[in-house]
Image: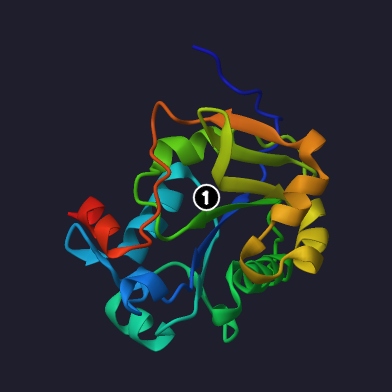
Amino acid sequence: METQPQNQPPAPPVAGLLLAAGGGRRLGGRPKALLTYRGRPLVENALRVLRDAGCGPVHVVLGASAAEVRERADLTGCTVLDNPDWAEGMGSSLRVGLASLAAASPRPAAALVSLVDQPGIGAEAVKRVLAAYRSPATLAAAAYDGERGHPVLFGADRWADITATATGDRGARVHLTNHAADLTLVECADIAEPYDIDTPADLARLE
């Protein structure tokens, strides 16, 4: 069995950043973080996936009904952030989360960004994307039959540009498009399903 040399430095920490601020507009205004999944709020499942995959620290960005989410969900062990501008779209939550990670001590080497409403993506897919980390300049994303999806891994050297370009619901799309040549796609279709919980019909996937 192979063992690591004793003088080899430990792997740099990769933070988990969960975006969980959505108000569920197409779900009649039901905050996505509080949708019930396996008897508990959906946000708890998403946080558990990040922890089980080895992310640390874990930060979560709340928005719609943030006070109720804090009251009803077990967010123990996470840095919980409120995004007062959550209605502007995912970009604002991404900015809040990356700013928090940039100010952390020690600062993580990268951030693994996931979305609260994708319960079909489990820890094994997250681990695959984490394994693509090479340096603070790493840019990697899960792919499903060749199509880019979540989670996405952003090395810390990229955070400033992402923060500057993340607006509306585009999130990091501008950065990803401008740096497509740097992107490593990690195929995950064999172990995960990237569906979103967006409409009442999608709620059947939570049963």
Q: Quadrant of residue 10?
A: top right
- Label 1 sits on a secondary structure element that is loop
Q: Quadrant of residue 166?
A: bottom right
69 vs 153: above or below: below
- Camera-side residue: 45 or 10? 45
Residue name at image x 68 percent, y 50 percent: 110
Q: Nearer the viewer, residue 42 or 135?
A: 42
x, y percent for residue 104? 68, 68
Mark 1 lies on residue: 55
Colour pattern of the rendering: rainbow
Judge the density around disc 1: few (<14), some (14-19), many (≥20) Cα neighbours within 10 Å: many
Is 166 situated above or below 11?
A: below
Residue at horizontal 66 percent and vertical 39 percent from the top: 140
The amino acid on which the numbered mark 1 sits, given as a three-letter code, is Cys
Task: Indicate whether 89 appears above or below 116.
Answer: below
Using residue 145 as the reference point, say whether residue 176 is left or right of it: right
Residue 45 seen in render: yes
